[in-house]
Amino acid sequence: MDEYSPASSDESPVEPRVTVTPDGPYRVGGPVAVTRKAVVTSADGESLAWSSPHPLPGPQGGGTVDLCRCGQSANKPFCDGSHQRLGFDGSESAEPEGPYDENARSLGGSGFEVRDYQKLCIGAAFCENRATSVWDLVPATENPVVRGLVMSMVDHCPSGRLTYRLGPDQPDNEPDLPVEIAAVTDGPLWLTGSVPVTLADGSELPTRNRVVLCRCGHSRNKPLCDGSHIRVDFRDGPAASA
């Protein structure tokens, strides 16, 4: 494993970018805000909304910063070099991802079309509540109230697993999201605003308005989040073991 070298604040990429370093952190550079966000839930644990962003130190005015990918930093979401001490294996296990259009299946809809690429699911659960789900509601979207509810559920999906478009030849109707990288409390990194991601082998992920990256170190679909943070009970507190 190559020796870890922390990001230098003197580096000033012109465009926002995330680079996955080999067996190391995510290197974030350019004019992109780094924040923390949390899922706002009901008394019954239903996902309702996103909290307001809490700004964190980062490259908002230029420069670079390293964000933890192994899940063991004592200074989350920032890297403290723990990946090197622990021998973190950050091998990218995600199968080559083609464009969303080639992978998503249509769920139908009246007045619009909802599409679903299940592999991108991270378990944020904005697509369902105790009473119903997007899949239950799509057949009833002739009703404009139901259609509006489905649109809202889809717009809150952080990974872009679910999308909708207003016609077969129309692009996905994406929510207006800032150029931002949010460390979701006890969860993944949520990239919004079409921030490009360069993989450790030099290739690039398809650039999308919404992308979610693993930061617990346990995803089976690295660097993408697959919801493993829920399975391993990942927490933002200091690393549990030295």
Image: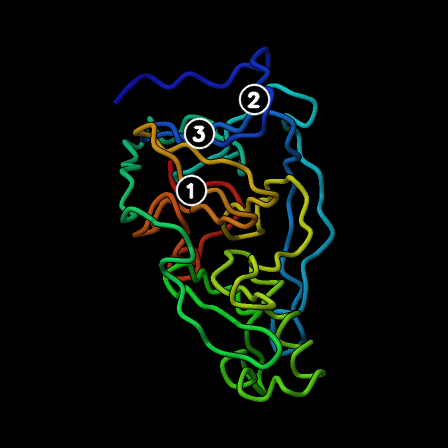
N-terminal of the pair, mark 2 or mark 3, is: 3
Camera-side residue of 137 and 72:
137
The quarter of the image holding the C terminus is top left
Front residue (pair 232, 98):
98
Q: Quadrant of the N terminus?
A: top left
Disc 2 to disc 3, C-alpha distance: 10 Å
Q: Amino acid at mark 1?
A: Gly
Whichever of labels 2 and 1 marks the residue nearer the N terminus, that label is 2
Q: Mark 3 and mark 1: span between their CA atoms? A: 17 Å
Amino acid residing under circle 2? Thr
Please, what secondary structure does the residue beneath circle 3 have? strand
Look at mark 3 in the image and give the residue it sits on.
Answer: 19
- Horizontal side of 53 relative to 229 (left or right) equals right
Q: Residue beneath label 1, please?
A: 71
Give the percent coordinates (x, y) of residue 44.
62, 78
Query: Residue pushed farthest right?
Result: 52
**Rendering coords of residue 68 (x, y %):** 46, 35
Closer to the eye: label 2 or 3: 3
Q: Residue at 40%, 41% (x, y): give it.
A: 205
Please tell me whether mark 2 or mark 1 is closer to you in this view: 2
Q: Is residue 11 above or below residue 211?
A: above
* Residue 64: mark: 2
Check disc 1: other Cα within 10 Å, few if <14, some if 14-19, many if 20+: many
Q: Report if the CB atoms under discs 2 and 3 are less than 8 Å apart.
A: no
Q: Disc 2 on helix, strand or loop?
A: strand
| Nearer to us: label 3 or label 1 | 3
What percent of the width, then of the height, locates residue 31? 65, 27
Q: Are marks 3 and 1 in contact (CB under 8 Å)?
A: no
